[in-house]
Image: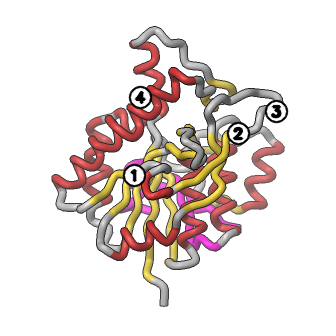
Amino acid sequence: MKDKLVVVKIGGNIIENESLIEKFLMSFVKIKDKKILIHGGGKTVTNFLKKINVEPKLVNGRRITDNKTLDVVAMIYAGLINKKIITKLQKYNCNSLGLSGPDCNTILAKKREVKKIDYGFAGDIEKINKKFLKQILDLGICPVICSLTHDRKGQLLNTNADNIASKISIELSKKFNVVLNYCFDKSGVLINNQKQDIISAKDYKKLIKKNIIVDGMIPKIENCFSALKNGVNEVYIGNHQIINNKKNCTKLTL
């Protein structure tokens, strides 16, 4: 029988709020099963770029990562945010290890091809080092993974954290019973300000056609269904209380 693995991805609005990140991490450390925490931090990057007088470039919510932006992304994700989270987890006796894609070749990616838009140094995932991650988990260590990848040719790449969470969950579902949680600033998927308890793949297609689910929620939910279709047991979207209270989230089903 497979062990259970809980994968949680946290978004920028949670990371930026000291009170919420503290409450979330206090819940996260109480997970008795093996666990992985994945984070982005785009809001922190945007704020820092403005401080150094670099105009952030985004198209449909996706960042254009030029050389200067990539430097900031690396410093903020792998440095500031990752180490702050690790420090807090150690405070709560959760032995954890900060990782980015290049570390032990955890996440291999390729630079996104230029089609209509040149996203710069954005990475599309090619391979997850599931053997290494399983070894870390079996040692009783919690990996804390930021949204940086590499191409194994010496190039760092900025990669969507939602996609990383989905891909890692899919790969590790071959070894574990995986529950994937997307934690952000809403209590789940809202339709007309009403939280939906469950959204099926069929419901989702209808909501897309009606332009009810739009913009940044589309790739997030696409990642949810991709995970479910490829071996992940359960997927939820919710707020910082998602660990303790599944009433405060939306469950995705096929």
Q: Nearer the viewer, mark 4 or mark 3?
A: 3
Q: Secondary structure at mark 4?
A: helix
So how many labels did they put on this image? Answer: 4
Q: Earlier in the sequence, mark 4 or mark 3?
A: 4
Tag 4: amino acid: Thr
The percent coordinates of residue 206 (x first, y second) are 80, 51
Kindly check if marks 1 and 2 are in contact, taking CB atoms under 8 A apart as contact: no
| Relative horizontal placement of residue 137, taking residue 173 as reference (left or right) | left
Report, in whole angstroms, how far the alpha carbon at label 1 lies from the one at label 2: 22 Å
Which of the labelled discs sits on residue 112, or is there none?
Answer: 2
- The C terminus is located in which quarter? bottom right
The percent coordinates of residue 32 (x first, y second) are 30, 73
Q: Secondary structure at mark 1?
A: strand
Report, in whole angstroms, how far the alpha carbon at label 4 lies from the one at label 3: 28 Å
Report, in whole angstroms, how far the alpha carbon at label 2 lies from the one at label 4: 23 Å
Residue receiving disc 4: 44
Q: Secondary structure at mark 3?
A: loop
Residue furthest to the bottom in view is 1
Residue receiving disc 1: 99
Q: Earlier in the sequence, mark 4 or mark 1?
A: 4
Q: Earlier in the sequence, mark 1 or mark 3?
A: 1
Residue receiving disc 3: 115
Q: Is there any visible trace of residue 116 in the rendered image?
A: yes
Q: Name which residue lies at 16% across and 53% down.
A: 91
Q: Nearer the viewer, mark 2 or mark 4?
A: 2
Q: Nearer the viewer, residue 150 or 189?
A: 150
Tell me if residue 12 comes above or below residue 243 in the rendering: above
Q: Which portion, as a residue range, is magenta?
A: 231-254
Tag 1: amino acid: Leu
